[in-house]
Amino acid sequence: MGALASALGGMLAGTLLPVRARAFSLEPGRVTIGGLEVWDWRDQLPVRRTAPASADRHLLTWDPDREYWRYRLRNRPITTAVIHNSGTRADYNLREFVAIDVNQTERTRYPECPYHFVIEQDGTTNYCIDMSRCTWHCGRESNDYAIGMCLLGSFMDDAIPTEAQIASGYRLLAALQREIPFIQFKPHCNMPGADTWCPGSTWPRWRDRIVPPPADRPQPRNPEFYSPTGRVARG
Ligand SMILES: [Zn+2]
């Protein structure tokens, strides 16, 4: 993520490569959510460019700028943040993880990263898909009101997230709580219709360290998070 690579990318984009209306950048930006600064990868990550199955069409929307089918905007306000594990190797970085998640055979229906937030093993916190999008991370009924936070790794048997992941997860959930004071936090396995161990069988051992206590007083709501077209300002 060096300045040199960034400058080089800019030079290439400006001279050698055809410039699209909204070219993909190789570098994430930074964005602040509830006072917490995180990496902003929105519209920067690998996507699937195949036509969706007809059964999925109504869950997707055509993006003419980026020329692919992406998750549609949510139809309901956000009330819940769902905690997931990726079930993959813990040491993938974000781009490796998303490339696999979008492309591997058993998950081929995902057009792009299914999680709004992904936390890497070293605690790096990534904002992947805008919260206004209804991604596919839990049940079809609940995706419309739930955002997804995924910790990279598989937390079964004795495995638990790293201390850095737990600390970053707590900070992110607390930041979301500042934006949406009445938001609830749930593990994927407790969502309606879920038939999964996600975020892993060791969840009860680290639950209390990653879930912040309820907000002690009501705070002003950020209406942007409640409207289907609401977006978090960049920068
Ligand atoms: Zn899950």
Image (cartoon, grey):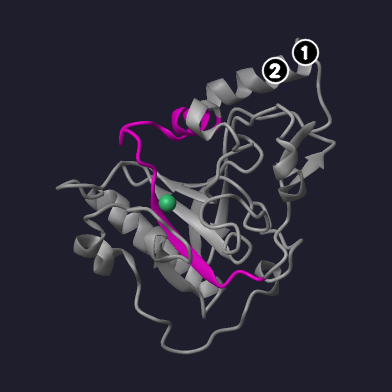
Is residue 120 covered in magenta?
A: no
Q: Is residue 18 above or below residue 59?
A: above
Mark 1 belongs to which amino acid? Thr
Q: Residue at x 23, y 52 (%)?
A: 163
Disc assigned to residue 11: 2
Mark 2 belongs to which amino acid? Met
Horizontal side, residue 188 vs residue 111: left or right = left
Q: Tell me residue 195's x, y (percent).
A: 40, 55
For the view shown, which residue lies furthest in the top direction? 16
* Boundaries of the magenta span: 77-102
Q: How far apart are labels 2 and 1 at the CA level?
A: 6 Å
Quarter occupied by residue 169: bottom left
Horizontal side, residue 117 vs residue 93: left or right = right
Q: Tell me residue 107's x, y (percent).
A: 52, 34
Q: Residue at x 46, y 89 (%)?
A: 217
Q: Tell me residue 157's x, y (percent).
A: 17, 47
Q: Secondary structure at mark 2?
A: helix
Q: Is mark 1 within 8 Å of ligand 1?
A: no
Q: Is residue 107 above or below residue 233?
A: above
Q: Residue at x 59, y 38 (%)?
A: 110
Q: Nearer the viewer, residue 168 or 158?
A: 158
Residue at mark 1:
15
Q: Is residue 47 visible?
A: yes
